[in-house]
Amino acid sequence: MKKLTYIYILALAVLFGACEDEVEKVAISSNPEGPTLSGPGDGGMEFEKDEAAESIEYTWTEADYGFDASVTYFVQIAMDDSFAGAANIVSSQELNGSAVVGDINGILLSWGLPIDEQATIKARVFSTVNTNVDTIFSTVSDYTVTPYETLIDYPMIYVPGAYQGWSPGDENGRLYSYGFNSVYEGILRIVDGANPSSSFKVTPEANWDNAWGGVLTADGSKFTGSLDPSGGDYSIDAGTYMVTVDVSALTIELEKTDDWGIIGDATPNGWSDPDTDMMYNGQRQVWEITTALTDGFLKFRANDGWDLNYGDDEPDGTIDGGGSDIAVTAGNYTIRLDLNNEKYELIAN
């Protein structure tokens, strides 16, 4: 038996020795040549809204690592040469690939680029083999783009409560993940009639299959708590809040914020209190109302008071603190107040 064992070990040694001689040694070039983005050409990323479903074709040259390899290529766009916050729009193992215009436009809007204003963005292609081989980036190309208006389909979670009829999925009660991550935000008017407080829960879907509740701890105008799947209803002082929920950290934070409305002889309530309340549109990130107006004037006002109000001195669609009354003619309008960009819109319906 001992003799057979020796023969077996010897055979293995011979076999593996022979295999080692036959293995081809892979040599990685000391100066690998990366891909080069060759298309689209100049102006090739200009597009219009009616081209949303069309695609833009990208082409590039082959990367040379000095050995035969299965290479994956990515086309990446960014706002500047640092490529911070870059987005990959194409992935391919060929020397070409395409990206849908609507998808590219959505990325531009998520970066906050102004609608209908020309901007310059950066693009490059890079190649990868595996984690043991360095990624190779091409030189950077400039492209001109003009984002068009469209709604971004941000991920959503829901805040059903007494203030909106305990309806998960209702438009009133949605939070959005603007960074497409675990953090969801929005402004909610959590007011249940004349009650001094209001109750609510948080649901990850537009149903009651799963729900978070718990206890909120007050700290001045801020309330914090945890997301507990077995928790009871949250309860909070009636008011308007910036709500932030992190579904990974299982935390919730609410902080009181300004509540906006319109006032003026053109509005339903005239110059009398209370204002005609606007609702916060989280998907657009603007305050909004659709209502009938008469010939006259209006202003935007926070918290039914004059401490914080906006008009328009030019008028040019830009809000001015304490500015002049905004003239309107009779009609049905969708009115939007964009505090982030300090502008407003009156859209006739």
Image: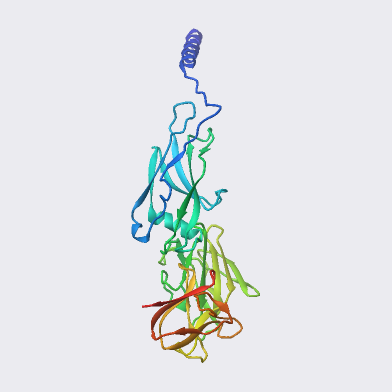
Q: Is residue 221 left or right of residue 300?
A: right
Q: From what the image shows, is residue 183 above or below residue 35? A: below
- Residue 81 x/y as whole percent: 56, 48
**Viewer-proximal residue among 215 and 120:** 120
**Viewer-proximal residue among 283 and 117:** 117
Res. 221 in view: yes
Q: How many marks?
A: 0
Q: Residue at x 44, y 38 (%)?
A: 72
Res. 337 in view: no
Locate the C terminus by quadrant: bottom left
Q: How is the image coloured?
A: rainbow
Q: Residue at x 34, y 60 (%)?
A: 50
Q: Residue at x 45, y 61 (%)?
A: 154
Q: Image quarter for residue 348?
A: bottom left
- Residue 199 x/y as whole percent: 51, 76
- Residue 27 x/y as whole percent: 52, 23
Q: Residue at x 49, y 29 (%)?
A: 65
- Residue 46 x/y as whole percent: 41, 54
* Residue with the most extreme right position: 220
